[in-house]
Amino acid sequence: MVSMASIQAEINIDGVKTRTVEQLIAPLIQQVTSLTNPNTMHSLKSTGKSGVVLVAAIERTVRNFVEIGRSAIAECPIAVGNVLEQLNETLQNVEHAGVEMVNRGHDFVEETSNTDRRAHAIRAARNLLNAVARMLIMADMVDVHVMLLQIAKAQDIMDLMVAAESKQELSELFESLNSCLEQLDGGIKRRILELRNPAEQDDLQAARAWLKLNNMIMHTSSTAYIRHPEVDQVRLNRDFAHTQMSLALQAMADILQGCATNRDVCLSYHGRVGDLIQQLDHFQARAYMEPSSYKDHLHRSELEGLLEKIVSGVAAIVDSENTRDERKKRTVDECNNLRQALQDLLAEYEKNCGRAEPSEDLDLAMVHLGHKAKDLRRHLRRAIVDHVSDAFLDTITPLMMLIENAQRHDERATVENGKMFQEHVDKLLQAAELVCAMSSNEDGIRVIRYAALIIDKLAPQVVNAAYLLSVRDSQVARDNMETFKNVWIDKVKLLTMAVDAMITVDDFLAVSEAHIIEDVKSGIQAVINGDGYLLDRSAGGIRGRSLRVCNVVDSEMDLVAASSYRDRVRMAAKLLRDDVINQFADRAERIVNKLENEAAEGNIDENRDYAVDVDEFIEASELVHNAVKEIRNALLMNRNPEDVDSDNEYEEDAGTNYPDSRSQTVDGENEQKIMRRLPEEEKRKIQEQIDVFKIAQSKFEREVAKWDETGNDIIVLAKHMCMIMMNMTDFTRGRGPLKTTMDVIKAAQEISDAGAKLNSLAKQIGDESVESETKKDLFAYLQRITLYCQQLNITSRVKADVQQVGNELVVSGLESAMSLIQTARNLLNAVVLTVKAAYIASTKYRRKNTAAPSLVEWKMAPPQKQPLVRVYNKPHGIVRRASEKRPMPPMKALAQFRTANIND
């Protein structure tokens, strides 16, 4: 038997690294596989065509391939000597294999049923494909060799630049290097587009960018070294650029040759998800299990150990310098709450091990654990945003202060500011790493860590460049400093954008608003103490945080389609940036100048009247705070409250209303709004019950959604009842289509009617089945449905005891609301059990002598259709363009190519 398994073993598919080679070989693969595929031959005959068409196409393709190959060899710059002989020999092999394939193909198409001729054709196809693949891979290796020669030439020029002794010699070498790098860059860009491996594409692009960045540094620092060889710091600048360019060139060479690359240059190595987020996900996944599978001696120690690892990781975050005391306390409390929630859940697992159905307390314990884990995640995110808000408040000022002291040639101040600048860099890196610790977005993590690595490398060199400028007043020193300044600013912007893309705008706004309030309090105290410097810093913090809010919000809106919502948010941000911040800055500056003048004149007195200044500062700060709140409100305008994971974003009447034709009420009669304004404690209790209801709902969906509604009224009624119950539970949270108590009562009546129909239909199924335990269970479940429908009618008057007296809300119907949800959950569980029992009774225990057809048809539902419009998800980090549907790649077609057993 001749099979393509042997053919694949000879063709080095893994050696095909570029799309160009794949595209060139694609037509031949398609034609050869079609010729030797019996199914394809049959389809050709059915359309009136013959195999002669394919043979002619193969002959034409091989001829064109050989002609183009000869032309390319003639133009190849390294096709001399032994290389030229190898290329010509390989091309001749392709030509000979093509002739053999054409001859065998003609023989085969004359008698396609002859197994010997088929075997010869397949062997000829194998030889041709191997010859073409070898030729293309060899041509690809020639391209790689050309680029490797350019890399070696660039490295030699760089080594000469290090040894250059005059500015003229350096300029000539730099021109030669630019010319060489320009040629290399063209080849590398084409290679990036052609590579099939996305990781190699990213790594090659990163190495290319790092090479270009250090090229200018190499020139300016080498020029400065020739002028000031006695300053050791400029030598460090030059050696840094030379080393980094060498690493970039070596990384390119390694990628081209398929070798392991340097982690400091390449991008693909930095996408590892942090341990803490993995531990949290793993803990929650392991904590939820069926009670019957729980083993105390195994699961208790495992889950407690996982939780303690999480707590240790949390401690490393909350003990950081920029974590606020209140946030630290809340996070520690949430860790303790999560510990207690785990113990409660484990206790419920032990109680439910031997039960047929889990108790409600177990569902509540599972929901409670999920809530505490969610709260811990939120506080961790906010703690991290604390760091981001402080570290990225002003990324440029430390650099400008360093440069300013260097330009004044104050060596001592430059050294001190250099230390401050490095501390600022360390804070940036720490905040960036914390963002990565609480994210599972590999692309975003990769970009952040790579940008942070670049900044970490550049920071000491920026300080060295500033030191050179402080001790030597020359144009080359200023040019060197300007180069490092531009590179630094560009890379810090990249890091800022990457970090902002990884944190949610809700978290950033909430933390920024809290920090602005802190700065306002600090500013008020400064006014009281007459401290103009502290007031200036506080006002600068408020202004900087406000500008950061505007930038983050604008970046967020860039991802949103044009709409009135986006325009409203942009307008709120524009108002803050262009109007409010300027007003605040002017008023704060007047107060600062007043305090500084009083201090200069010695008029500061403990008994002075500072009330006017305090009121002025509070009014100015209130403008900023209100503008930030307006931005937050505009952002939340089209949000679902359930989608906002927050502890302080909610505003009154911020819920989403859904119009319904059954209930069109004016604002005064809309009782749903009152439900949204219930006290937070009551909302929390209602939410706990709703979460338990969702567990029952998920069980319902797993059981009922698998059945087709066609010909099965039981499934239709069950789904209808579930939908109504979901609307009723939404009403208790101030959401959904039900607006008033009357709407809820009507919905309860609909459920009662549907329950009566379901009861009647299921009872007929039970009557048609033989006596069994299933029949008894079915009738028992029907009694439950009747009972719960009656209870639902009673509890549907949930709003009867909720009243609004003046501006105060008097709530006395909380128990009714919770009873409504509990009854809905019990009814949903009863419906699930009824569906199960009805299926078994009608399919397994139906009387054989029953002549009438079955009342319902139990058929599995077809797979759900995919939506025509893809749901939009906010992208994080690098966003790759999704590829449209294309034909099967030729290399995959080759891999799937199989032939029949010729011995059959």
Image (tube, rainbow, N blue to C red):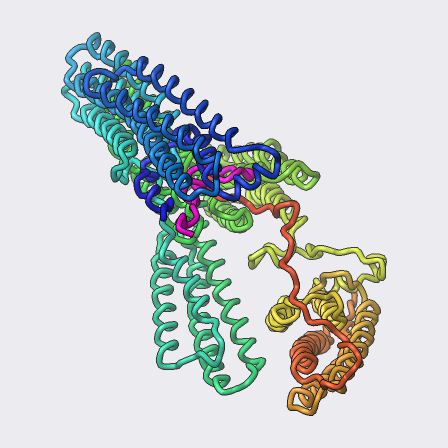
Residue 756 placement: quadrant = bottom right
Task: Write the residue at 85% across / 61% down.
Answer: 662
Magenta span contains residue 389:
no
Name the one closer to the observer, 107 or 56. 107
Task: Write the residue at 26% across / 38% down.
Answer: 261
Task: Write the residue at 27% across / 15% down.
Answer: 77
- One can see residue 535 in this view: no
Query: Is 829 drawn above or below residue 719 in the view shown?
Result: below
Name the magenta segment's main secondary structure.
Answer: loop
Name the one closer to the observer, 21 or 541. 21
Task: Write the residue at 50% across / 41% down.
Answer: 545
- One can see residue 431 in this view: yes
Residue 897 placement: quadrant = top left
Residue 222 placement: quadrant = top left
Name the one closer to the observer, 326 or 457. 457
| Residue segment shown in magenta | 880-904
Horizontal and vertical percent position of residue 439:
43, 51
Say left or right for 521 vs 158.
Answer: right
Magenta span contains residue 895:
yes
Say left or right for 261 vs 813.
Answer: left
Horizontal and vertical percent position of residue 777:
67, 87
Name the one closer to the observer, 58 or 440. 58
Horizontal and vertical percent position of residue 239:
19, 26
Q: How many marks?
A: 0
Say left or right for 469 vs 660.
Answer: left
Query: Is 547 drawn above or below residue 389 in the view shown?
Result: above
Horizontal and vertical percent position of residue 870:
61, 46
User: Farthest residue in the bottom direction?
Assistant: 771
Say left or right for 833 vs 336.
Answer: right
